[in-house]
Amino acid sequence: MAAELRTVLDVPDGDREIRAEDFAPWSYNLHYLSSREPWTYRHHRHEGCFELVYVFDGVLEHHLEGTWRRFSAGDLLAVGEGDYHAIRGEVFSYANLILPVDFWETFVRTLVLADPLGSPRHCGGLTVRVVPSLRREFENRLDGLFRHQQTAEGERRLRRFLGLLVFEILWMEASDEAPGFAEGAPPAWWSDLVNRVETAAGIPEDPRSLAGWAGRSREHVARSCRRYMGCSPSQWLNRLRLDRAALLLRKTNRDIADIAFDAGFGTVAHFYRLFRRRFGLPPAAYRRHHGDAP
């Protein structure tokens, strides 16, 4: 999927480089881009259209809202009309689907659903992960769009593709209020994740690994954690580590440093600081007051 790109010039702040009328009267424009050496596309914005960026393989970095973010195979990023952004990478292959804002908004209205993007005018770096079970079908439909773009057949395929995108990927990722969920109750995937984490022999060291466990994007896992746990993934995992350490302090006579490392803390000092903040006592005093092991 190699592609020749024109030289990208500096784009002054506020200028828009990609316009919906550039590919009118068709409803979409699709590029396949890849590289095996350092590559970059300078900052730009859109006018009347927005992008969906899907990574086939490798690692792609996107500069959005002031920070560089990394995306890998299966990640799908929405870039709104007003999102000023840039792209870079070394070894990657990705698809860039550009849709007119008006077309998207009309399509969503016909479904009588809330827009799963929030708004195509500013998506805020919304990222979802296409789960492995859907990836082949998603990529096949994307390939059909690529081969039939700027034809009547491509226009027909676009609506079928967007149906898969909205109902199987974006809607289920961006909203947990789908039919079948009790009001305010967490979805099944979140309950499964909590059970897996809380019963695992070792609590994950990196909060980012939760996305792989859940089959969801890191952003969606973080939003769900704040919603259902009232804290960030890092805070939740630290709380579980501290609870596990407190149990060992109460029920065993193991060395405190050994307990700290076993619970997943990199240093004893860090463990002491977090433990005292959570339980109001340092580990040794907590053991004296609450321990019942001989």
Image (cartoon, grey):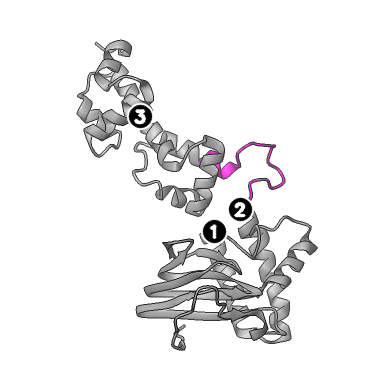
Please tell me which residue lies in front, 241 or 101: 101
Residue 201 is situated, as x and y percent measured from the top left of the image, at: 35, 36
The answer, for residue 292, to whether it is visible in the render is no
Q: Which residue is mark 3?
A: 242
Which secondary structure type mostly characterizes the magenta part of the structure?
loop
Marks 3 and 2, how far apart at CA: 31 Å
Please tell me whether residue 234 belongs to the stretch shown in magenta.
no
| Mark identifier at residue 128 | 1
Q: Is residue 283 above or below residue 111?
A: above
Decide which of tag 1 and tag 2 comes sooner along the chain: 1
Please tell me which residue lies in front, 165 or 126: 126
Tag 1 secondary structure: strand
Marks 1 and 3, how far apart at CA: 31 Å
Q: Is residue 23 above or below residue 237?
A: below
Measuring 50% from the left and 52% from the top, which residue is drawn there?
219
Callout 2 amino acid: Ala
Residues shaded magenta: 172-192
The answer, for residue 108, to whether it is visible in the render is yes
When asked about the image quadrant of residue 258, the answer is top left
Label 2 packing within 10 angstroms: few (<14), some (14-19), many (20+): many
Q: Are marks 1 and 2 in contact (CB under 8 Å)?
A: yes
Q: Which residue is mark 2?
A: 174
Please tell me which residue lies in front, 194 or 24: 24
Measuring 45% from the left and 66% from the top, which residue is drawn there?
63
Label 3 packing within 10 angstroms: few (<14), some (14-19), many (20+): many
Decide which of tag 1 and tag 3 comes sooner along the chain: 1
Residue 109 is situated, as x and y percent measured from the top left of the image, at: 78, 62
Residue 48 is situated, as x and y percent measured from the top left of the image, at: 66, 74
